[in-house]
Amino acid sequence: MERVREQSGFFVKLTDDEMRMAAQRGIERHIDCLRRGLTHLYGADHKDGWAMNIEGACGELVVAQIFGLYWCGNLGNFAASDVGPLEVRTCRNINDPVLSLWQKDKDEAPFLLVVGNNGEYELVGWTFPADWKRQEYWRDHYGKGRYAYCVLPKDLRPMGELFERAADWYRRRLGLRLGVECSMPESAEALP
């Protein structure tokens, strides 16, 4: 994984092996849904399912790598979070991205918008669904009959804020496991 920090977010280019691994999980998800006779949630065209599952899995892998979290792809477990405590929405439309949220989304879970395709992605920002579940955000952003609570990239929280929250979470988790109070350097420059 190649990481390049840009002003608008974090850009990630997956290696060939990483793309294969994530694509395989996306393919397995799609085949599992076909075998179980499941249709895509929220009105997505079934013809888009193949690409949506593969790119969604790639977006989840990007988030897992950036945050240092294990990713298994949660085959068939729709109730599980995408990556640790995080939820990921991958948008393939790089020219007009939107983070789509639905009523059943967990209000307290951080939802990240990953934009891109074919192994090149940007972590754009994040939000809590509770901030957007209001009628004024309920719309059909792309005009395809798929209504959702739509959050534009400019309205998302910056990734740096989520990284700070994650550092606090890691500190608490490590302290609980070791039975000690843990502290972290004040800045990333102090890290080895």
Image (tube, rainbow, N blue to C red):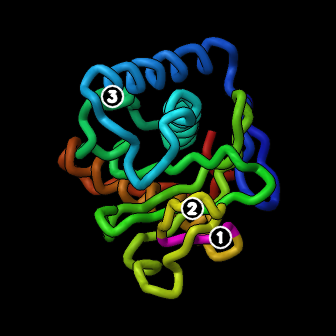
Q: Nearer the viewer, residue 43 or 177?
A: 43
Q: CA distance from mark 1 to mark 2?
A: 6 Å
Say whether disc 3 or disc 1 marks the residue closer to the N-terminus: 3
Q: Quadrant of the N terminus?
A: top right
Q: CA distance from mark 3 to mark 1?
A: 29 Å
Per the rendered image, the range of residues in magenta is 149-153
Whether pointer 1 and pointer 2 mark residues with C-beta atoms closer than 8 Å, the reply is yes
Badge 1: few (under 14), some or many (20 or more) residues near its Cα, within 10 Å? some
Residue ID for mark 2? 99
Q: Position of residue 49 (x, y in %)?
A: 50, 33
- Mark 1 lies on a secondary structure that is loop
Q: In which quadrant of the rendered view does residue 99 lie? A: bottom right
Residue ID for mark 1? 152
Residue ID for mark 3? 33
Q: In which quadrant of the rendered view does residue 178 lie? A: top left
Q: Nearer the viewer, residue 112 or 158?
A: 112
